[in-house]
């Protein structure tokens, strides 16, 4: 019998649970509050910019690490919002989404067997990224109503083997926005243990209740040891365009660009031009974005609480972790998610998929997204009320 030609690294992770829930939602006709993509139109100005770029025949390869105009727009926005003066030619790399950016970062800086610290609940891609890069993940759990970390637990997670820590703020799935004090604790440990910080800031412009997004790269001593990831997908409701980017000092950018070049060559050229236009014009758009999502947050929070869920009010991003313990359901989170999809017609994501394998921390929770039209959210609310 022929041997199985399958790499061992693929055995430690499964297919995306989020995208599995989307398929089940389609199968059962459920309202898809599982996958974090908008079901409403992108802003007119970014769509028109893409049409204009295609009509201008910007249809061939861009420079592999990003079109000059887009890199300049990213650098200028970073200076304007966060006070970081970065070189678009040496410190910005455009990628095929933030997902590729994270994979680039892990492959560029992690050696086989290095330890990488991750806060849980975490975005589901981080475990496969670690497996494919050879990293060993060390988990620190965010606990309580505000998803806070214990400083002692975080310190114990660091060791001479720690190569990097991943920080996702605003956080998917919890909606937590890390405070300056929390980031300063992380920064101090990174410097003490000579550790890199890989920070996923894809939801940087989706904030509520006066919260402030603080890039850890802006803290004293951190720019030279930080890889910052962000992108266009969530901010401009263009998740299918696959446009992300990395910001890092030149010595790290050189390695990131080499990995990126041979992973994907480059992101779509006309969409890069459209992204540059969007960033250049978006300063007045960001407050409108926050106001829109604050209203959607209220619709879904009210519906979930009325249906008996216990919910943390998200501080950023567009997800709600909902505890169903009080609803009298006997099964675990996966069974409950399937029940909601099949019998109620609303699709969430099982909470356990955001925690380390074998943990029961998410077994009584599911995640919902409110990145949907008001009509979708109200219909989901109606269905939840009838359960």
Image: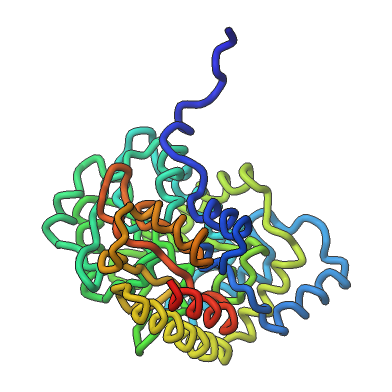
**Furthest-top residue in this view:** 1
Q: Position of residue 92 (x, y in %)?
A: 55, 63
* Residue 225 seen in the current view: no
Q: Quadrant of the C terminus?
A: bottom left
Q: Is residue 158 left or right of residue 268?
A: left
Asked which quadrant contains residue 374, the reply is bottom right
Q: Position of residue 54 (x, y in %)?
A: 84, 69
The vertical placement of 311 against 142, above or below, is below
Colouring: rainbow
Going 87% across and 66% down the picture, which residue do you hit? 57
> At x 31% / y 66%, what residue is drawn?
324
Query: Toward the viewer: 136 or 114?
Result: 136
Task: Name the side, left or right, on which 265 lies relative to 123.
Answer: right
Residue closer to the observer: 239 or 53: 239
Above or below residue 263? Residue 153 is below
Percent across and percent down for residue 286 are 53, 86
Residue at coordinates 55% horizontally, 54% vertically from top-left? 19
The quarter holding residue 270 reads: bottom right
Q: In terms of depth relative to the viewer, which is nearer, 332 or 214?
A: 332
Total tally of numbered discs in the picture: 0
Quadrant containing the N terminus is: top right
Say if residue 237 shows up in the picture.
Answer: yes
Residue 280 in the image: x percent, y percent? Answer: 63, 82
Residue found 23% across the figure and 70% down from its top: 182
Is 4 situated above or below 10? Answer: above
């Amino acid at each position: 019998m022929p041997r199985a030609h399958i790499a061992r690294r693929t055995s430690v992770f499964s297919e995306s649970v989020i995208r599995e829930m989307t398929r089940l939602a389609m199968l059962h006709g459920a309202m898809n509050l599982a996958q974090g993509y908008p079901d409403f139109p992108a802003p007119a100005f970014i769509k028109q910019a893409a049409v204009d770029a295609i009509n201008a025949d910007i249809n061939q390869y861009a420079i592999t690490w990003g079109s000059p105009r887009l890199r300049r727009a990213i650098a200028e926005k970073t200076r304007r919002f966060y006070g970081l003066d970065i070189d678009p030619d040496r410190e910005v790399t455009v990628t095929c989404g933030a997902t590729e950016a994270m994979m680039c970062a892990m492959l560029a800086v992690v050696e086989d067997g290095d330890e990488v610290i991750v806060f849980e609940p975490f975005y589901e891609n981080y475990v496969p990224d670690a497996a494919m890069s050879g990293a060993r993940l060390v988990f620190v759990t965010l606990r309580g109503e505000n998803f806070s970390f214990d400083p002692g637990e975080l310190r114990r997670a660091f060791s001479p083997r720690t190569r990097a820590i991943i920080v996702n703020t605003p956080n998917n799935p919890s909606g937590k926005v890390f405070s300056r004090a929390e980031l300063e604790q992380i920064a101090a440990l990174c410097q003490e243990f000579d550790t890199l910080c890989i920070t996923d800031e894809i939801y940087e412009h989706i904030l509520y209740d006066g919260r402030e997004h603080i890039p850890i790269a802006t803290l004293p001593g951190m720019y030279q040891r930080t890889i910052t990831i962000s992108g266009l997908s969530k901010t401009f409701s263009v998740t299918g365009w696959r446009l992300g980017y990395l910001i890092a000092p030149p010595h790290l950018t050189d390695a990131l660009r080499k990995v990126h070049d041979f992973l994907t060559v480059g992101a779509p050229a006309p969409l890069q031009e459209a992204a540059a236009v969007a960033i250049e014009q978006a300063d007045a758009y960001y407050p409108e974005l926050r106001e829109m999502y604050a209203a959607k947050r209220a619709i879904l929070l009210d519906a979930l609480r009325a249906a008996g869920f216990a919910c943390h009010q998200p501080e950023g991003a567009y997800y709600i972790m909902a505890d169903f313990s009080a609803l009298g359901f006997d099964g675990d989170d996966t069974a409950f998610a399937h029940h909601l999809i099949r019998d109620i017609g609303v699709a969430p994501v099982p909470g356990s998929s955001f925690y380390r394998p074998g943990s029961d921390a998410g077994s009584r929770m599911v995640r919902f997204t409110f990145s949907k039209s008001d009509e979708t959210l109200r219909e989901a609310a109606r269905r939840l009320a009838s359960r």
